[in-house]
Image (cartoon, rainbow, N blue to C red):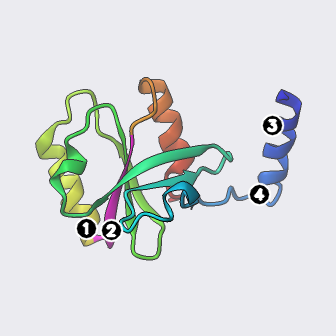
Amino acid sequence: MAALAYQFKDDLFAEGTPPAAQEMPMRSTAALGERRFTAWRGRSGRRYVASIFAIADQHALGFTDAVLLAVSADRRIIAARDSGPLGIEAALTRWQRSVAEAGAHEIHVHLLAEDGISRRAALLDLMPEV
């Protein structure tokens, strides 16, 4: 199994530039009138499920130990960050304001990373290339 994953990763990056993360909407929520959840496929191929919040929704900033993704209207991640263990409100509010000015329309919150190392790995996998 590890050999297959390694081969897939080699093929994935064969062009030289890793592809950007891509949103993969969840089929199980397609029948709901409101989009509340989505999934992102990182450059590694790993899948990350996230809750969707409007850019101005302060609830998106209330989670601790979460991966926050600022998403544009054309469904691209324009910024990502770890909310941190304390959810430092002032820093998160500044980030929210700056990503809104940069064109973010939503904040997607990934809560399933179990620890700081997992959150860091998710951030590196999902962050846009600079």
Point out residue 67 in the picture as x, y percentages from the top left corner: 39, 42
**Mark 3 = which residue?**
5
Asked whether disc 3 touches disc 1, contact meaning CB atoms under 8 Å apart, the reply is no
Q: Earlier in the sequence, mark 2 or mark 3?
A: 3
Q: Mark 4 or 1 closer to N-term?
A: 4
Q: Which one is nearer the viewer's eye here, 59 or 126?
A: 59
Q: SS of the residue at dot 4?
A: loop
- Identify the residue at image location x=18%, y=63%: 56
* Mark 2, residue position: 104
Residue type, numbered disc 4? Gly
**Which mark is nearer the camera, 4 or 3?**
3
Tag 3 secondary structure: helix
Residue at the image point whose x is 45% and y is 25% from the top? 114
Q: Position of residue 36 (x, y in %)?
A: 37, 57
Query: What secondary structure is marked by label 2?
Result: strand
Task: State the quadrant of the N terminus.
Answer: top right
Q: Position of residue 102 (x, y in %)?
A: 31, 70
* Badge 4 or badge 2: first in the primary sequence: 4
Q: Give the label, 4 or 2, closer to the camera.
A: 2
Mark 4 = which residue? Answer: 16
Please name the predominant secondary structure of the magenta segment in the image: strand
User: Badge 1 is on which residue?
Assistant: 100
What's the magenta region?
A: 102-110
Dot 1 and dot 2 residues touching (CB under 8 Å):
yes
Q: Quadrant of residue 22?
A: bottom right
Q: Is residue 106 magenta?
A: yes
Q: Amino acid at mark 3?
A: Ala
